[in-house]
Image (cartoon, grey):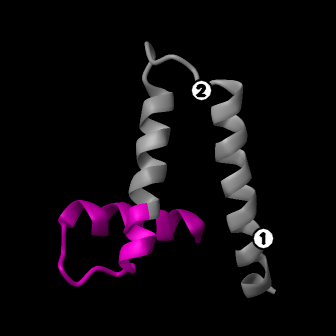
Amino acid sequence: MIADVIGKAVVMLSSHSPHSFFRRDVQAYIRACEYLISIASIQDSPPFTEEERQVIEYYAEELAKVLRPLTK
């Protein structure tokens, strides 16, 4: 199911539809995540520093905390 939602997100963002399935703040989050994933995936790209990893993990955990009550 999550793969279907992610696939839909990619299609919706790439189509540049003015009537997007996702709110603008969620679209910005998706774009930022896709950017970080693409940078990390480039073979010659330097790895994230420990500090960068900690910041990314911190925000991922904080987002998970606020979303967790919605999934119960």
Residue 17 is covered by the magenta coloring: yes
Can you identify the residue that label 1 sits on? 65
Q: Can you give x and y, in whole percent of width and height, for residue 8 in the image?
A: 39, 69
Circle 2 SS class: loop
In front: 18, or 15?
A: 18
The image quarter containing residue 69 is bottom right
Q: Can you give x and y, in whole percent of width and height, for residue 22 in the image?
A: 39, 78
Can you identify the residue that label 2 sits on? 48
Residue 57 is covered by the magenta coloring: no
Q: Give amino acid for label 1.
A: Lys
Q: Give amino acid for label 2.
A: Phe
User: Is residue 13 placed above or below 58 in the rendered structure?
Assistant: below
Instruction: Count neighbours of disc 1 (C-alpha within 10 A) and say few if under 14, some if 14 to 19, many if 20 or more.
Output: few
Quadrant for the N terminus, please.
bottom right
Label 1 to label 2, Cα distance in Å? 24 Å
In front: 69, or 5?
A: 69
In front: 56, or 42?
A: 56
Q: Can you give x and y, in whole percent of width and height, for residue 21 in the image?
A: 35, 81
Q: Are marks 1 and 2 in contact (CB under 8 Å)?
A: no
User: Is residue 18 placed above or below 40 in the rendered structure?
Assistant: below
| Labels 1 and 2: the sequence-earlier one | 2
Q: Is 13 on the left-hand or right-hand side of 3?
A: left
Circle 1 SS class: helix
Q: At x 69% / y 31%, what residue is drawn? A: 51
Q: Which mark is residue 51?
A: none
**Majority secondary structure of magenta residues:** helix
Q: Which residues are magenta?
A: 1-28
Q: At x 45% / y 16%, what residue is drawn? A: 43
